[in-house]
Image (cartoon, helix red, strand yellow):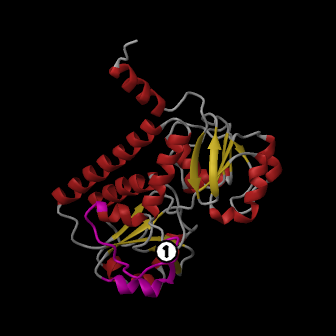
């Protein structure tokens, strides 16, 4: 009996290919995740995970802090029919179980509840924000791994390619306008005397650098990538533009107009104050794109002497 070498080679190659329906395993921060098929009912317990699923074209069956997502994150938009399962700090295990998920996505902040979550459904644990992490790199990892888990790896790659293209386009706009010279200080107001200022180790730094800009605040922040400071400390970033990110404290513009700390600042006197729509600083990859577009538009339109 003759043996066909090509047939032997083909058979060997076929053995190396994944078998349809065969279980796949992924390593994660809480151990391993093994699934027999792509999950269809997914619960996301933080907004970075929620955003990543929506970018993949997947509507989670349940999320934590649904109402807050619409205020702080906004894009990608969360469908109305998604159930709320409590807060991100203390989600309801009962509400999660009632949804009968086949995957739960969470982070190490929920470590005390990890065993209980595993009893409900297979759980994937990844932390975009933790000591020593590079947020954008971890956010990319979350998106691509969820793409693999859900059978949408091509979609994940397309999303990342679109973000890179957008960043390049916005950088060219700023360079052509000649307005990349001054550093930018990115802030959220906590009240009329204090701000959260975003540091070089945060998610927003990716947008700042990709646009060819410099972060006016050079001190490292906490592992979430920010520092909480008084307005008087913003004076250290004197030769800069101040970019105020929504949402704003009610009555903020009037309060600032009467604030000696605010009116003293050189960016205020130089009309270098810019207001941009909300971009969630503790999210996944999408806030980098959202911030880059909003920041570029604001700088192109010009600043003012207050939050307008």
**Secondary structure type for disc 1:** strand
What residue sits 46% from the left and 34% below the top?
16
Quarter of the image containing the C terminus? bottom left
Give the image location of residue 175, x and y in percent.
19, 59
Q: Residue furthest front?
A: 1
Q: Is residue 213 magenta?
A: yes
Which residue has dot 1 on it?
226
Q: Report the side of 195 relative to 46 (left or right).
A: left
Q: Is residue 264 visible?
A: no
Looking at this view, is 163 or 254 the one in front? 163
Give the image location of residue 43, x and y in percent.
67, 45
**Residue extent of the magenta highlight:** 210-238
What residue sits 51% from the left and 41% below the top?
148
Q: Report the side of 4 relative to 251 (left or right).
A: left
Give the image location of residue 117, x and y in percent.
75, 53
Q: Is residue 142 magenta?
A: no
Give the image location of residue 272, x and y in percent.
32, 72
């Amino acid at each position: 009996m003759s043996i066909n070498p090509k047939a032997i080679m083909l058979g060997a190659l076929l053995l190396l290919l994944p078998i349809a329906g065969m279980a796949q395993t992924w390593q994660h921060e809480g151990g391993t995740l093994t699934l027999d098929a792509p999950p269809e009912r997914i619960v996301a317990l933080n907004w970075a995970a929620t955003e990543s699923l929506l970018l993949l074209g997947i509507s989670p069956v349940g999320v934590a802090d649904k109402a807050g997502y619409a205020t702080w994150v906004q894009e990608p938009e969360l469908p109305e029919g998604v159930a709320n399962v409590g807060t991100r700090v203390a989600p309801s295990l009962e509400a999660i179980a009632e949804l009968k998920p086949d995957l739960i996505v969470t982070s190490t902040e929920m470590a005390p509840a990890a065993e209980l979550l595993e009893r409900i459904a297979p759980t994937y644990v990844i932390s975009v924000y933790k000591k020593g992490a590079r947020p954008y790199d971890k956010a990319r990892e979350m998106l691509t791994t969820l793409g693999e888990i859900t059978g949408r790896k091509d979609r994940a790659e397309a999303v990342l390619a679109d973000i890179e293209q957008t960043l390049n386009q916005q950088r060219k706009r700023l360079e052509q306008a000649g307005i990349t010279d001054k550093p930018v200080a990115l802030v959220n107001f906590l009240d009329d005397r204090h701000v959260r200022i975003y540091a070089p180790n945060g998610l927003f730094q990716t947008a700042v650098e990709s646009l060819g800009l410099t972060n006016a605040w050079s001190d490292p922040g906490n592992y979430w990538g920010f520092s909480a400071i008084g307005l008087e400390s913003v004076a250290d970033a004197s030769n800069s533009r101040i970019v105020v990110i929504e949402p704003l404290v009610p009555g903020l513009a009037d309060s600032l107009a009467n604030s000696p700390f605010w009116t003293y600042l050189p960016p205020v006197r130089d009309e270098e104050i810019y207001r941009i729509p909300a971009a969630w600083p503790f999210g996944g990859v999408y806030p980098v794109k959202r911030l880059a577009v909003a920041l570029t538009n604001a700088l192109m339109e010009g600043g003012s002497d207050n939050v307008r």
